[in-house]
Amino acid sequence: EVQLVESGGGFVQPGGSLRLSCAASGVTFSTSGMNWVRQSPGKGLEWVSYISSSSKAKYYADSVKGRFTISRDNGKDSLYLQMDSLRAEDTAMYYCASWGGHDSGSGSFLGPFDFWGQGTLVAVSS
Amino acid sequence: EIVLTQSPGTLSLSPGERATLSCRASQSVSNNYLAWYQQKPGQAPRLLIYGASSRATGIPDRFSGSGSGTDFTLTISRLGPEDFAVYYCQQYGSSPRYTFGQGTKLEIK
């Protein structure tokens, strides 16, 4: 059974930083493209960032580009999101999500999200 | 960037009825790389349909997807009480980003 378990969320003041983690099990993590998706309270889904299986390709939504950094450690089956210069509008539930297919590593194909974690909540407020 | 517009915003139906949800793209979705997700309160989304019309693993056959180009539809043939939720469409594929529609809330009438 595939499991994605997020951690690292919490309360932070505007301008602060947080690092989210996502631990994967039951999946061949080293061949999985990984993503972060967020959902503000009562709102819809917003894709945040993608990282290819090899880490060669990293993509970001315009709303977080330059402030967030995605990374992964295939030896630890873990995905990360470093969030800096946080704003109130970054308040959301953050999910990690992955495509169940084989990611080429080049970032040339971004698959749909077969697997999701349960999310970790980030609250940015003064 | 492709913008996805879902309609209606809210759909009120009774169990046993047929539901038809629409997702319209601002430009053609390449290779019909269009997915549908279901999200219930307090839960993560669940993949229902990918490639516009292929059901994901374990999804009942009362869920079906259709369409191509810019117009896509999710149909639930006979609504069960567990089907009342929010549904999102998503564009994926070769673009260096994903986009979601704003969602359709399917509520009990």
Image (tube, rainbow, N blue to C red):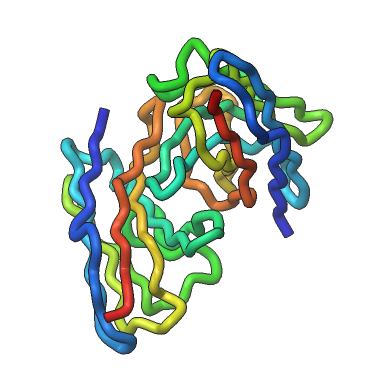
Q: Residue at x 55, y 44 (%)?
A: A99
| Among the 4 quarters of the image, the one containing residue A53 | top right
> Where the N terminus of chain B falls, by quadrant?
top left
Q: Is residue B67 visible?
A: no
Where A94 sits versus A71, above or below? below
User: Residue A110 at what x, y percent from top left?
Assistant: 46, 35
Q: Residue at x 40, y 22 (%)?
A: A63
The residue furthest top is: A66
Using residue B15 as the reference point, say whether residue B3 is left or right of it: left
| Among the 4 quarters of the image, the one containing residue B77 | bottom left
Task: Return the residue nearer the eye: B3 or B11.
Answer: B11
Q: Is residue B87 visible?
A: yes
Using residue B42 as the reference point, say whether residue A27 is left or right of it: right
Using residue A24 as the reference point, say whether residue B23 is left or right of it: left
Task: Return the residue nearer the eye: A42 or B11.
Answer: A42
Using residue B108 as the reference point, say whether residue A98 is left or right of it: right
Q: Residue at x 32, y 78 (%)?
A: B108
User: Looking at the image, how many numbered discs can be counted on the residues?
Assistant: 0
Q: Residue at x 46, y 60 (%)?
A: B39
> Where the C terminus of chain B falls, by quadrant?
bottom left
User: Residue A40 at what x, y percent from top left?
Assistant: 45, 41
User: Residue A47 at what x, y percent from top left?
Assistant: 44, 35
Where A118 sits versus A71, above or below? below
The residue furthest bottom is: B16
User: Residue B98 at what x, y percent from top left?
Assistant: 39, 35
The residue furthest right is: A75
